[in-house]
Image (cartoon, rainbow, N blue to C red):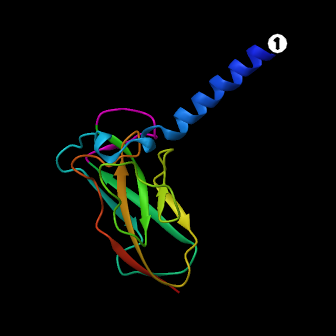
């Protein structure tokens, strides 16, 4: 393979990688179109209960009513995937949900997880995101619950 072709392939790979890295996350808040959610859709905690005292690791189970689960990147009407907000408020609703220790993504369609949490009080909240990790319109979020880890 000659050098010019190698350079073109490397450049094409870089452009594809850069585009994938920015994806929807590179959009300004005003640019992100929110996916509609049906009336009455709800996301909630099956476990733990609000006010529960638990030990770490904590098993967290997610519930969803009025919508279905689809992995990130998949677009089906009235579907989304879970995001768990830990010890934080909801992020801006017109932008992709951040990915960090306080905003955990379940983009494969998972409906439960196990968390290692330090002893003390913690808040948990669920937020459903669409195929591009953007909250629906209207937003589908659980009430914020508080748990105490022994």
In-front residue for pair 5/78 = 5
* Residue 47 picture location, percent across and down: 41, 68
* Residue 43 picture location, percent across and down: 31, 56
Work out whether 143 lies above or below 37.
below
The region drawn magenta spans: 66-77
**Which residue is found at the position 28% from the left and 67% from the top?**
143
Does residue 42 appear to the left or right of 147 in the view shown? Answer: left
Work out whether 43 lies above or below 109.
below
**Which residue is found at the position 32% from the left and 47% from the top?**
29
In-front residue for pair 29/116 = 29
Does residue 61 appear to the left or right of 36 in the view shown? Answer: right
Q: Main secondary structure of the magenta part?
A: loop
Q: Residue furthest right?
A: 1
Q: Is residue 96 magenta?
A: no
Quarter of the figure with the N terminus: top right
In-front residue for pair 123/1 = 1
**Which residue is found at the position 31% from the left and 40% from the top?**
31
In-front residue for pair 141/7 = 7
Work out whether 83 lies above or below 37.
below
**Which residue is found at the position 41% from the left and 40% from the top?**
132
Q: Is residue 76 magenta?
A: yes
Q: How many marks?
A: 1
Could you say whether the residue bearing mark 1 is in a helix, strand or loop? loop
The residue pinned by badge 1 equals 2
């Amino acid at each position: 393979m000659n050098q010019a072709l190698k350079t073109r392939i490397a450049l094409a790979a870089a452009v594809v990688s850069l585009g994938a890295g920015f994806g929807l996350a590179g959009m300004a808040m005003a640019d992100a179109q929110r996916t509609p959610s049906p009336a009455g859709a709800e996301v909630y905690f099956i476990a733990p209960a609000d006010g529960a005292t638990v030990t770490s690791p904590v098993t967290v189970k997610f519930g969803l009513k009025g919508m279905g689960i689809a992995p990130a990147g998949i677009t089906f009407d009235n579907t989304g995937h879970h995001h768990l907000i830990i010890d934080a408020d909801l992020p801006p609703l017109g932008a992709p949900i951040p990915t960090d220790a306080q905003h955990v993504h379940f983009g494969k369609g998972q409906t439960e997880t196990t968390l290692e949490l330090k002893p003390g009080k913690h808040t948990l909240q669920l937020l459903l995101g669409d195929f591009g990790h953007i909250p629906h319109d209207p937003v589908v979020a659980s009430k914020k619950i508080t748990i105490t880890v022994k």
